[in-house]
Amino acid sequence: MFTYDAPEALLKDRIILITGAGDGIGRAAAHAYAAHGATVVLLGRTLEKLEKVYDELEAAGYPQPAIVPLNLDTAAEHDYIELANQLEETFGRLDGILHNAGMLGVLTSIENYDPIIWQQVMQVNVNAPFLLTQTLLPLLNRSKDASVIFTSSGVGRKGRAHWGAYAVSKFATEGMAQVLADELENISPVRVNCINPGATRTAMRAYAYPAEMPENNPTPEQIMPLYLYLMGPDSLNVNGQSIDAQGNGSA
Ligand code: NAP
């Protein structure tokens, strides 16, 4: 497991947007970031889940979060512009984005892959993070140091049979992070990196590996050290990297 001992006030006064914040790893990141002082903007498609996380954060006495219900499969340009306008009005800037929302699609051969599901997976996993990042870049550039984190996967580095659009989308994610990191290096306060969470105990994992014992995988809470490290200023000089949350690294 990547190890990092985050200072309590690591993300104090930071405004951080998390996609897929209602469940799994995104929900754990919302808790971890808010617990370290951040005001988190919870984006996701199921309002009830976002409201539950909102209530949990409020009950814990963390900074008051914000909720953005948005389906990344169907969101249009005006939705992204509206979000940017709302964030600008409310906060005036953005200090970080965790691109965490993801869609698995189906596990089948490319020969048999349903083209409609293929496009949905690419829309949620690749096109939406692109549109979100592009629209919010002016707000990120107003931060003194901002962090953009994309979420990859083991199959985004080595293709595997039957992982179809999901694997292809994660290769694209790694590429997008590298291109953007290189473009922004030295000219912007924004750094860009990728996290590969590794096998983690969530609904997506259970769906992909129905025969697996969930207890054998770490919980989303257990993999948070890397999420904290890359979001906070201790990683100021880390740019264009793809790091394993369950790897041997430390900071
Ligand atoms: P999860 O428990 O299924 O959570 C995925 C989140 O993404 C949910 O909050 C979901 O919202 C949201 N989401 C899905 N489609 C969306 C859409 N169209 N619009 C907006 N939000 C949407 O999965 P997870 O395991 O936490 O996965 C988080 C990230 O880690 C994903 O990018 C995944 O590919 C990656 N990852 C996970 C593992 C693992 O073992 N768990 C391994 C490698 C990579 P709803 O709850 O409303 O559906």
Image (tube, helix red, strand yellow):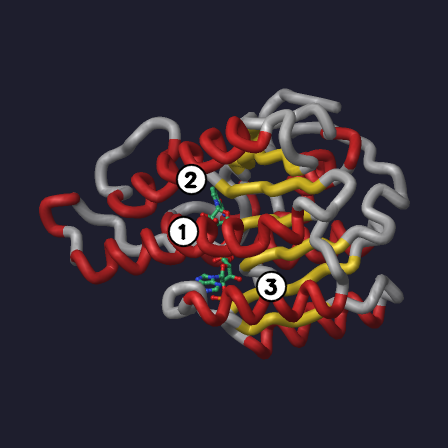
Q: Where residue 164 appears, x then y in whole percent?
A: 25, 44
**Residue to which mark 1 is pinned:** 125
Left or right relative to 69: residue 104: left
Distance from mark 1 CB to nearest ligand 1 atom below 8 Å: yes
Asked whether residue 126 is in view, the answer is yes
Dots 1 and 2: beta carbons under 8 Å? yes
- The residue singled out by tag 2 in the image is 173
Q: Is mark 2 on a helix, strand or loop?
A: helix
| Relative side of 136 to 250, left or right | left
Disc 2 from disc 3: Cα separation: 22 Å
Query: Which amino acid lies under the numbered mark 2 shown in the image of this protein?
Result: Thr
Q: Which amino acid does label 1 sit on?
A: Asn
Would you say 85 lies left or right of 34 here?
Answer: left
Name the amino acid type tagged 3: Ala
Q: Position of residue 85 (x, y in %)?
A: 62, 68
Residue 198, given in percent of the width and then of the height, sits at: 51, 36
Q: What is the spatial separation of the Cα atoms under label 3 and label 1, in whole angstroms?
A: 20 Å
In percent of the image, x 75 and y 55: which residue is there? 15
Q: Tag 1, which secondary structure?
A: helix
Task: Find residue 187 and report its image quarter.
Answer: top right
Query: At 23% from the left edge and 42% from the top edge, which residue is drawn?
Result: 162
Quadrant that contains the C terminus: top right
Answer few, some or many: residues within 10 Å of disc 3's Cα (few below 14, many 20 plus, some between 14 and 19).
many
User: Which of pointers 2 and 3 lies earlier in the amino acid sequence?
Assistant: 3
| 72 or 90, nearer to the observer | 90
Of the two numbered discs 3 and 1 in the rendering, the one whose residue sits closer to the viewer: 3
**Residue at image mark 3:** 84
Task: Evaluate if marks 2 and 3 touch, with contact meaning CB atoms under 8 Å apart.
Answer: no
The single residue placed furthest to the bottom in the displayed view is 48
How many angstroms separate mark 1 from mark 2 (CA)? 8 Å
